[in-house]
Each structure stands twice: as structure tokens, then as C-alpha cells.
Image (spheres, rainbow, N blue to C red):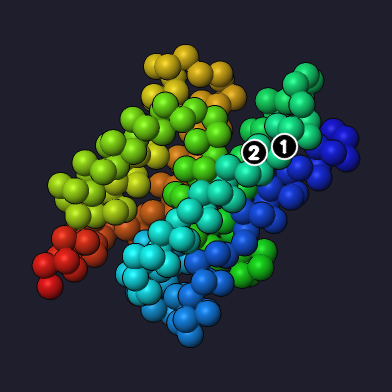
């Protein structure tokens, strides 16, 4: 384990930990951690500050998942340690978003950042899960349900499409972490108290 390898993993975590949603909301005078769901992700930002800032947050969170993987691949190059470096880089990036050192390790749920990692590894698998996400949210109105279904199926798509083992392993780890972060949402879905975009739009 050389210094370049360690640098890439640590950098991935620190980039993943950047709370773009919070930074964008502060410019509007709103602390998203104390309003709405209290989450720093794009969904809560969109609810509180509108779709434009929500979409910008989404794109930035996706980019901080994709870019560390890209940089690690370029720096490490092909050869010994390539797959391990990318695996740990992707995991560190998502964990950075979920447990950011800048916010006392209280972060988001990792969906958008995980999406950035998935896009780097297997764009076609992402397309299939994105279709499922759109259908789930469109029919139910629950973004959390779409996120749960999409993340859970990513490893399956990768498996059926013959992706490398390290990609399936990393996507499985990220999916598990996303589900663990969504436990409160799962409880609300089961009890019928989860917030729905359909109800918000109707009201």
C-alpha cells in the first residue's frame, strides 16, 4: 500500500464529504439540517429551496461520486492494485457523503453520490435502475422508494451484464449502506407516513 494509493482514498473521502446541499442552502439563508427532513441531499434542498437549487445539488453530489473514481483511475493506472484502489475510492467517496468529517460525521443518504460512482463503473446498469426509479417515483410519489429499489437492483444489473467482480462487490456495499441510511424512511413507508411528492404537488 503506497502513498499514492492512500492519497487517492483519503482524497475521495474528503471530496465525498463536501456538503454541497448545505453550502448552497446557506447562500439562501436556510439551514436545511433544521428544516424539512433535515437531510443535506438534493431531495430536501428541492423541497425547501426549489427545483433549480435541488437539481444543482443533485448534479454536484453526482459529480463528487464520479470524479474521485476518475482521478483514481488516472493516477493509479492499469496494473496491480487498480481494482482495489477503485473499490476503496468509491466506498470512501460514498462514506464521505454519509459521514462527513466537516459536519461531525452527520451527512446524507448517499444516493446521488452513489449514482456518480455507479455511472463511472457501469452506465448501462445505471440506465436500467434509473428507469425503475422513475417508474417507482411516478407511480408511488415516494422518492425514497425509488432510491431503495434503484440501489438494490444495481448489483443485479451488473451481475447479469457480466461486469467485473469488484464492481458488483462495491455496488452491493453502497446499496447496503443506502438501505441502512434509509431505515427511517422504510419505517415511514411501512406506517404510511412517508412524504409523497404527489401529495405535495396536489396540495
Q: Quadrant of the N terminus?
A: top right
Q: Which mark is residue 18?
A: none
Q: Quadrant of the C terminus?
A: bottom left
**Identity of the residue furthest to the right in this view:** 3
Q: Secondary structure at mark 2?
A: helix
**Residue 178 in sight from this viewpoint:** yes
Q: Label 1 near label 2: C-beta < 8 Å? A: yes
| Apparent side of residue 144 relative to residue 167 in the rendered image (left or right) | left
**Identity of the residue furthest to the top in this view:** 162
Q: Residues within 10 Å of mark 2 (few under 14, many from 20)?
A: many
- Residue 203 drawn above or below residue 174: below
Q: Secondary structure at mark 1?
A: helix
**Residue 186 in sight from this viewpoint:** no
Q: Residue 98 appears at what percent x and percent y? A: 54, 56
| Apparent side of residue 168 relative to residue 198 in the rendered image (left or right) | right
Q: Which residue shows up at 24% across the image and 54% down it?
A: 142
Q: Residue 8 appears at what percent x and percent y? A: 76, 42
Q: Which residue shows up at 51% across the image and 19% down it?
A: 163
Q: Residue 133 appears at what percent x and percent y? A: 29, 42
Give the residue at mark 2. Answer: 69
**Identity of the residue furthest to the front in this view:** 52
* Closer-to-camera residue (25/93): 25
Give the residue at mark 1. Answer: 72
Q: Residues within 10 Å of mark 1 (few under 14, many from 20)?
A: many
Q: Which residue shows up at 69% across the image and 56% down it?
A: 14
- Residue 69 drawn above or below residue 19: above
Q: Which residue shows up at 69% across the image and 48% down it?
A: 12
Amino acid at each position: 500500500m503506497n502513498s499514492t494509493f492512500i492519497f487517492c482514498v483519503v482524497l475521495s473521502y474528503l471530496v465525498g464529504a463536501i456538503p454541497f446541499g448545505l453550502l448552497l442552502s446557506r447562500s439562501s439563508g436556510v439551514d436545511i439540517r433544521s428544516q424539512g427532513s433535515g437531510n443535506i441531499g438534493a431531495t430536501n434542498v428541492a423541497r425547501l429551496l426549489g427545483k433549480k437549487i435541488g437539481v444543482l445539488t443533485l448534479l454536484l453530489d453526482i459529480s463528487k461520486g464520479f470524479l474521485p473514481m476518475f482521478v483514481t483511475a488516472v493516477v493509479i493506472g492499469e496494473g496491480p492494485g487498480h481494482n482495489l484502489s477503485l473499490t476503496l475510492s468509491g466506498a470512501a467517496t460514498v462514506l464521505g457523503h454519509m459521514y462527513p468529517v466537516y459536519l461531525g460525521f452527520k451527512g446524507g443518504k448517499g444516493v446521488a453520490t452513489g449514482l456518480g460512482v455507479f455511472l463511472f463503473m457501469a452506465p448501462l446498469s445505471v440506465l436500467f435502475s434509473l428507469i425503475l426509479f422513475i417508474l417507482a417515483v411516478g407511480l408511488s410519489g415516494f422518492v425514497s422508494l425509488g432510491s431503495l429499489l434503484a440501489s438494490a437492483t444495481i448489483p443485479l444489473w451488473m451481475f447479469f451484464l457480466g461486469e467485473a467482480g469488484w464492481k458488483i462487490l462495491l455496488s452491493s456495499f453502497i446499496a447496503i449502506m443506502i438501505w441502512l441510511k434509509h431505515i427511517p424512511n422504510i419505517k415511514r413507508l411501512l406506517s404510511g407516513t412517508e412524504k409523497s411528492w404527489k401529495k405535495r404537488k396536489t396540495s
